[in-house]
Image (cartoon, grey):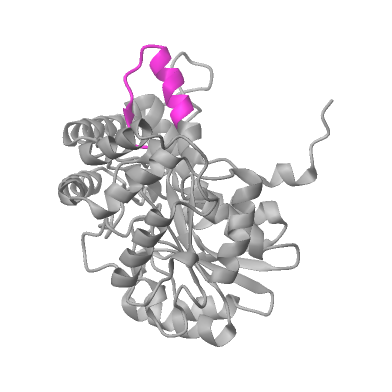
Amino acid sequence: MLRLADRMSQLGQESAFEVLMRARALEAQGRHVIHLEIGEPDFDTPANVVEAGCRALRNGATHYTPPAGISELRRAIAEQASRTRKHAVDPAQVVVTPGAKPIMFFVILALAQPGREVILPDPAFPIFESMVNFTGATAVHLPLREERGFAFDVDELRTLVNDRTVLLILNSPQNPTGGMLERSDLAAVAALCAERDIPVLSDEIYDHLVYDGEFASISEFAGMSTAERTIILNGFSKTYAMTGWRLGYGIMPVSLAEQVTLLMINSNSCTAAATQWAGLEALTGPQESVEAMVAAFAARRELIVAGLNALPGVSCVYPRGAFYAFPNIRGTGMDSRTCADFFLHEAGVACLSGASFGPSGEGYLRLSYANSEANIREALERMGAALGNIGSHRVSEGNAGSGPGYSL
């Protein structure tokens, strides 16, 4: 029998893929399921980006590249960040990776260890805490409050910081809530982190998907540039509908970039060459497809929030960014997991339990509106019908096609 290392027990799941598998199992039984669980744009990769990748393959981009990425792409990333983050970024600060998750993994692996603490938002993308646990460090939860638009209280953050704190993780616009941090909050966090010399891993993967207000990065504030204390995590999956291409990057102090490059050498060697050339075209080519996608998401946001607020026992604040709605479902009388199971089995709508994103997510669901308006409308109709008939649902475990019992 294999004797696994103890640290393997610390790795968690990503709930979206778990629910996707359960939904696929129902579909295999002939059920029709509307998928609102996966955080993936339902748009095709722009044609010019696809052509750039194909052209790169035809031109021989089938070999190893430098572990930190091809110079052309690193330079383009640095130039864009210099313009948008309002401070000079050197290409030496950029590390290109196969997807954005390696930046999470590598940065946390490089900084966290037993006896150290990492502060992360709660609820949050579950891989953050999974990686912190894997290193043996302690994850410290910073609650996001619905009454604050799913932002956190900077004074509460201040009480969590101590001499063991080695990293603060931020995500704005945020997964799963769609909330954003105000510029004033970022300024206060920047002052705290600069004073206490705390690096920040800023997940900015949804920076282009903003509907209310303007995107702001903590790296714009004094003492928090990417040459000092901020590590920007970003990528191409969400903005350019390139989830399957696996292309992400980090921007960070050069000293840390050198260590992350070592981790790349020891794990992936490099990111696929043709994918990087496609990414270069995405950054430097026409942006009309991005603008059209954001406009479509904005319309879907209006549709899904209005529909959720019309459901009995459900309320939903407007997400300011990303493509997730995070409705409060406490009025249904169900906990988050039970409610998500109820909608999957009784309405054929796949969504995620808020509790799978952290303790503060209990009482909420996450629904991705990266789906067509027609499917969103049908999903809302199904959810309303299921809740309207809730008195007749006394489903016991084991009934054909049914989920767990709903004691209401």
In this orientation, does residue 42 appear? Answer: no
Quadrant in the rendering for residue 387 = top left
Q: Provide residue 225's location: percent of width, then percent of height.
A: 44, 77
Quadrant in the rendering for residue 118 = bottom right
Q: Is residue 79 above or below residue 185?
A: above
> Residue at left 41%, top 65%?
145
Q: Is residue 148 left or right of residue 210?
A: right
In the depicted view, which residue is nearer to us: 342 or 75? 75
Query: Which quadrant, please, contains the C terminus?
Result: top left
Q: Is residue 13 above or below residue 286?
A: above
In the depicted view, which residue is nearer to us: 61 or 324? 61
Q: Is residue 105 left or right of residue 242?
A: right
Farthest residue, direction front: 59
Q: Is residue 328 left or right of residue 209?
A: right
Query: How many badges with numbers are in the image?
Result: 0
Query: Which quadrant, please, contains the N terminus?
Result: top right
Q: Provide residue 192's location: percent of width, then percent of height.
A: 51, 84
Q: Examine the structure image and report whether residue 21 is included in the region drawn in magenta.
A: yes
Q: Provide residue 282's location: percent of width, then percent of height.
A: 28, 48
Q: Examine the structure image and report whether residue 104 is included in the region drawn in magenta.
A: no
> Residue at left 69%, top 74%?
164
> Residue at left 70%, top 55%?
135
Magenta-highlighted residues: 20-37
Q: Is residue 192 above or below residue 305?
A: below
In this orientation, does residue 89 appear? Answer: yes
